[in-house]
Amino acid sequence: QVQLVESGGGLVQAGDSLRLSCAASGITFSRYHMGWFRQAPGKERERVGDISWSGTSTSYADSVKGRFTISRDNAKNMVYLQMNSLKPEDTAVYYCAARRIGISEYGRWGQGTQVTVSS
C-alpha cells in the first residue's frame, strides 16, 4: 500500500522558518520524482516545486524561489521542504506527491499538513 505522510506543519510568524517532511512507503522511492504542492483556502492547488528521483535537479515556483528548498534522502524514503522567510501568503495545506519516472502526472498524494504564517 502506497503511503505518503507529511509532517512538520504548524503556526509560525512571518520571517520564521519551517521544515516539512514527507515519508514514503509502499513504493520504490528512487523510481519517483517528488513534488510539493499547496492549497490555500478558496484557492486552487498550486505547485511549490519538484525534485528529481536522484535529487540532482530541482525546480520551484516563482513565488517561493530563493526561500524554499526541496531535498530528499533516498536511503530513508524521505523528501523535505525547507521553508525560510515565510510570509502570510504561504499559509496553506502543503502536500507531497510522487510521480513515477516517465509519467507526466503525479499519481500519489499525501494527506497534507497545515502551515499557517501569522503577520
Image (cartoon, grey):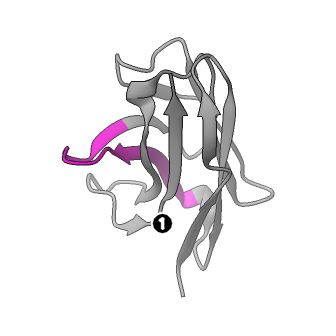
Quarter assignment of residue 88: top left
43 part of magenta stretch: yes
Which stretch did the figure color magenta? 31-47
94 part of magenta stretch: no
Disc 1: CA contacts within 10 A as few (<14), some (14-19) or many (>=20): some
For the point 43% across and 30% down, the residue is 90
Report whether residue 65 is seen.
Answer: yes
Residue sticking out furthest to the bottom: 1
Location of the N terminus by quadrant is bottom right
Residue sticking out furthest to the top: 66
For the point 51% across and 40% down, the residue is 116
Residue sticking out furthest to the right: 75
Q: Amino acid at mark 1?
A: Gly
Q: Which residue is mark 1?
A: 110
Judging depth in this view, the residue of 23 and 53 nearest the camera is 23
Residue 25, image x, y percentages: 64, 74
For the point 55% across and 76% down, the residue is 3
Q: Is residue 85 placed above or below 90 in the rendered structure?
A: above
Q: Secondary structure at mark 1?
A: loop
Judging depth in this view, the residue of 20 and 49 nearest the camera is 20
Judging depth in this view, the residue of 23 and 10 nearest the camera is 10
Residue 24, image x, y percentages: 63, 67
Left/right of residue 45 with respect to residue 117 in the rendered view: left
For the point 33% across and 39% down, the residue is 47
Q: Is residue 39 placed above or below 56 in the rendered structure?
A: below
Report whether residue 81 is seen.
Answer: no
Residue 71, image x, y percentages: 66, 36
Residue 111, image x, y percentages: 47, 68
